[in-house]
Image (cartoon, rainbow, N blue to C red):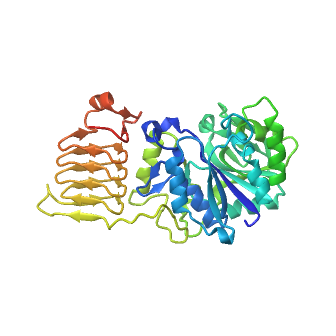
Amino acid sequence: MKNTLGMILAGGRGTRLGPLVQDRAKPAVPFAGKYRIIDFVLNNFINSGLSKIKVLTQFKADSLIRHIMVAYNLPRSMGMYVDPVPAQMRIGEVWYRGTADAIYQNSNLIVDSGAERVAVFGGDHVYKMDINQMMEFHTSKTADLTIAAIPVRQDQSNQFGIIEVNEDWQIVGFEEKPAEGKTIPSKPGWCLASMGNYIFNSDVLIEELDADAHEDSEHDFGKNIIRAMIPHRRVYAYDFATNRVPGMTDKEIGYWRDVGTVDAYYEANMDVRSVSPVLNLYNVAWPFRTYPIDYPPAKFALDEGPTRRGHAVECLVSEGCIISGAMVLRSILSPGCFVHSYAQVEDSILYDKVDVGRHAKVRRAIVDKGVRIPQGIEIGYNLEEDRKRFFVSESGIIVIPKGAKL
């Protein structure tokens, strides 16, 4: 890892998340209370010993940059850093035209680092991964490019970039969201989907990016770079289902989620807060860092009978929260939330400093930062009325945006 530069693509709009990205980039969206989505890839890098990291940002990057600067202040004197890199238009008067173009416009960072390899990863997925194991596979195959891939059912192939491999896992074909993707030779009915995580040899990456920059293309890794490399480079797929991190349980193996829609994001959060989650945040052998919060401990106040008892069941409750004579069920409370007496919160996600008034009822909702829910209001009990005021997902998840006045 000492000769590897990590580059994280964190500039996507994430428009399918609706109101959740009206003021922030997708990788900066909160997750599991106190974390952000980008914490997953950053912790995967750092826990794997990869500590020279550039995070490429573009849209609505302010909160993302502040989060990175405070949470990942590594000792630069020891050659370690996590640097946000805003779009700079170094090549011309254009923003990033695709994932490959984002790296091309910052190829000077690769040259200046002197790195032999570059790990190009996305910043908006939820998973744990030991990058060393993928790197060992890359070097053992003397590959020019290795792509992390996850098995998916063939009937899901229209949702992913599908990789075709031979028996040695060398990539011989790539299709973007085909109706019926080519299956894995040893696993009938299953295809290999690209996770958008790549390890390149640096010289090869720069050559391919330079060639693509002068072509009439979409300047995208999946649609252009990979396809161009397959005929004349050594391109391999790494099976993510074989990856193990220290302390991982058997049911965690192969866990990876694209949280690109409100429903997918909600489901991933609800899984983490469940009694026996597939994704375990409490694994001390694979620490999960984030922005340090100097708040007091969570407090559960009052016990005056069943209607005014401060309690939470099957929840994640972050520091600084106060549940005062209220009931919170199967929910996630981010730092600094206050749920007042006689209120009820069910199956919901509350972002930082949400205030739920007395006798209010909130069900199957995502409430953004700083929103005040007035006393007596009901949310999630009449979807027809909720749709008149708020964004409601296909499965009926209500999203109350930051700055909403109820």
* Image position, residue 99 (x, y; %): 68, 41
Q: In the current view of this chain or complex, which residue is farthest to the left?
A: 304
Check the image and report above or below for 387 versus 205: above
**In the visual, does 358 lie left or right of 126?**
left
* Image position, residue 260 (x, y; %): 52, 41
Along the line of sight, the residue nearer the viewer: 90 or 55:
90
Q: Residue at x 29, y 59 (%)?
A: 313
Check the image and report above or below for 275 versus 285: above
Is residue 182 visible from the viewing direction of this image?
no
Along the line of sight, the residue nearer the viewer: 251 or 322:
322
Q: Residue at x 27, y 29 (%)?
A: 385
**In the visual, does 37 lie left or right of 114?**
left
* Image position, residue 324 (x, y; %): 20, 59
Q: In the current view of this chain or complex, which residue is farthest to the right?
A: 232
Q: Considering the image in quadrants, where does the C terminus appear?
A: top left
Residue 274 appears in which quarter of the rendering?
bottom left
Along the line of sight, the residue nearer the viewer: 185 or 193:
193
**In the visual, does 56 lie left or right of 290?**
right
Residue 73 appears in which quarter of the rendering?
bottom right
Q: Considering the image in quadrants, where does the N terminus appear?
A: bottom right
* Image position, residue 140 (x, y; %): 81, 61
**In the visual, does 165 lie left or right of 241?**
right
Along the line of sight, the residue nearer the viewer: 117 or 113:
113
Is residue 61 visible from the viewing direction of this image?
yes
Q: How many marks?
A: 0
Check the image and report above or below for 205 versus 284: above
Q: Residue at x 49, y 58 (%)?
A: 279
